[in-house]
Amino acid sequence: MKTVDIIERIEGEAKLHLSWKNGKVQDAHIAFLNFRGFEYMLQNKPALDALVYTPRICGICGQAHLYATVNALENIYSNANIPLEITPKAKSLRQLGLIIEIIQSHIKWFYYFIMPDINQQSHHFDEKFVPLKGQSWLKAQEASSSIVKALATFAGQWPHTSYMIPGGVVSDPTFMDMIFVENYIDKAISFFEKQMVGVDLSHYLSFSNAEDITHIQGDVNQFIQMSFEQGFDTIGQSHDRFFVISDDLGFAKGKIKNKNTVKVDLNKIEESSAFTFELDVQKQKKEKYSWAKTVKYDNLFYETGPLARALVQNRKQIKSLHKEYEDTILTRVMARVDEIAFLLHQSKELLQSISLNEASFIEPKIALKEIDEGFGLGVIEATRGSLQHKVDIKNGLIQRYDVITPTVWNLGPGNSLDYGVAQKAIIGVKSLHEATMILRSFDVCSVCTTH
């Protein structure tokens, strides 16, 4: 028996094809069917145009794509041995923008994509998680919208901001602007403390053991109880290998294989189109079933995202939860909740470090259009995980642009000989609800995947 279902309420759509045997999923294909073509659009465009195009790859994580793009363009200068000066102020404003984007996305993900489905199947159904009218749902909407205003205060707008450029940012916030930013962040902290976990942020950040989840109250406590009720502490395990591409935002970069954390070599990242549709339909083959590509590190699939970041960084509570419950839905969701707390704390520290007297932008001595040939690599940690942009330019024009997104890492296609991360996590579950919740635990972004 084969079931085909469209997974909705994600950024874009995906089709989940499941094959069943004896009441369990025997095989799984995750198909992303909406081709978008940003990499092709960018060919022969002026290099700086990428700063306008790439933030539109996604309506949720455009800030991340902008950050990766500006890193890649600045890397062209570095590889050409052309000095480029960027002030600490500019760096902090970039980091703060990405942190805010991640926080608001995590809040939306928890209340829009996790809680409605888990609540619907619970024996303890609660009206407050019902989309559009539940009190917790509405408060989450208000909180995520409020903190985005902090980003728009110095980035000009959200989504699709383009305030980062080689040499800094084109934003020069005033003292009053930063007071407003801090006020919006404080509101998000209050929401996290009062609505999500029911304890002070500082108290939450002191948790270091799996047992400490018993001290969590609020909506996250209900998630935990519903997870145990529905067995989410026992399903969703994948390869148990983790990858973090950047140490920006206070994270630590590295990979975990067989419980050991080691440094990463970006040259070992390999992208494949073995299961990816061809633009030329004449070349289409039976084994190709998605517009998503496949990405591996040193020929192995690795999970990326908040759980990977928490484990590589050795955040104690999540490491203890992982030791107890492995890479299950419960652990994966709690890692993302934990990251909200970590990044709220980081945002306050960044605010205090910004000196408004510094320059926001220092113009490069040489324009990109004056560089005959160049290659740039930009890597950052986005909402859903590791993001990489590569660009080749010639006479200031883009010759090739390549993007590897977090959902490609986590939901990229494989087959029964070598399943991708999410595929392997789904194999063996007993219901469509379980399979769907496993996918949601990775926070799927279809439009980024089929960029």
Image: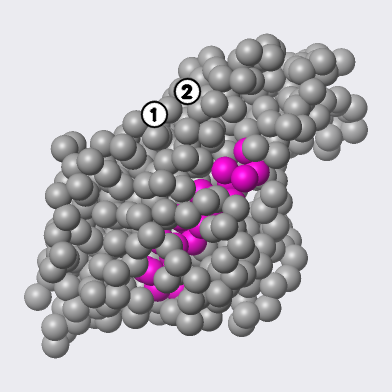
Left or right, 370 with reference to 148 = right
Quarter the N terminus occupies: bottom left
Residue at 68% in and 31% down: 351
- Tag 1: amino acid: Ser
Q: Are the residues tagged 2 and 1 within 8 Å (C-beta)?
A: yes
Residue 110 in the image: x percent, y percent? 35, 50
Numbered badge on residue 149: 2
Quarter the C terminus occupies: top left
- Above or below — where is 159 with respect to 445? above
In magenta segment, residue 334: yes
Residue at 61% in and 62% down: 206
Residue 83 in the image: x percent, y percent? 90, 27
Q: Which residue is mark 1?
A: 145
Considering depth in this image, is 447 or 105 the residue closer to the camera?
Answer: 105
> Which residue of the protein is positioned furthest toward the left in this rendering?
1
Residue 396 in the image: x percent, y percent? 70, 20
Q: Secondary structure at mark 2?
A: helix
Q: Which residues are magenta?
A: 327-347
What secondary structure characterizes most of the magenta part?
helix
